Amino acid sequence: MDQCQNNTIQGFYIMGFTASGTATYLKFTGFLLMYVIALTGNMLIALLVCKAPQLHTPMYFFLSNLSIIDATYVSAILPKLLSLTLTDYREISFTGCITQLYFFVFCADAEICILICMAYDRYVAICSPLHYSMTMRKSVCAMMSGCSFVASVLNSLLLTLLTSTLSFCSSHNISHFFCEIRSLMLLASSETTSTEMVLFVEDICFIFFTFVIIMVSYVCIIYNVLKIPSSAGRLKTFSCCTSHLINVILFYAPIILLYIKPRPNDSKEEDPLVSLLYVAVVPTLNPFVYTLRNKEVIGVIVRITKIKSSR
């Protein structure tokens, strides 16, 4: 095994989802709809936050960051999935695979970091409202966002470099619909202990601990909300957190199911389906989660629509 030469420059073969006949076109249509909705919806939110002065608040600043991450997320994964679904051309170059892995890890880590920033923003807004404007001033928000992206870049670079040094001699068939890190490690012919240790620490830090931090912040939020005398006041106060809480549950549930567990002996058939939830479904749903019940965003859209129609 130590003598094995790394011949991954010839690339990998992504197995994707098996389908034939009409099922192939149905899957392609579904993936295409998710990609179009996720890309346009998230970019629209980022554009609205940028253009509308009334949305220049910490909450919407972090929301625009999240939208840009989601748009990048689906653009790194879904185009290749659409191609292999429609054409059955499953080959991806080694460079292309490592690049896809880099953006996958970067976007996942960045989304987790921004979700923590949004949780802190909601915590300060509800638990310390008198100090909100000072605590969440622009410089602080910019620093929080910048640190989130820097941490994500460094962690993604580390995991990508470790994966790129592995040897893949026995098989190049990835039992997934993209270059997912665990699926690549299962194919490795060289020793993966160090990479597994780094991935384990990364899972604990970026997934488990961050989820606990967010849940603790919501315990504090709920505690303060329950102290509000009127039920209408409690409902109104907590409603500003529901979109973020829904997003956290949708994003973390499949990730915890996949990564906070021992490494499987072989690729699980259900893993690609679960991965599809946070790679495609969650970015597709986010624009609806943050706009359908958000009067400020809907108000901006209505005003822009009226201005354009009047012209």
Image (spheres, grey):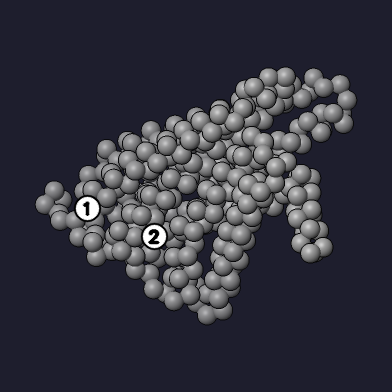
Q: Nearer the viewer, mark 2 or mark 1?
A: 1
Furthest residue to the front? 311
* Mark number displayed over residue 142: none
- The one nearer the camera, 276 or 128, is 128
28 or 169: nearer the viewer? 28
Q: How many marks?
A: 2
Mark 2 and mark 1 lie on one chain; the one further toward the N terminus is 1
Q: What's the amino acid at mark 1?
A: Ser
The x and y percentages for residue 103 are 42, 51
Q: Quadrant of residue 63?
A: top right
Say what amino acid the circle numbered 2 marks: Ser
Residue 167 is marked as 1
Q: Residue 33 or 170: which is nearer the viewer?
A: 33
Q: Which residue is mark 2?
A: 175
The quarter of the displayed image where residue 306 is located:
bottom right
- Image quadrant containing the C terminus: bottom right
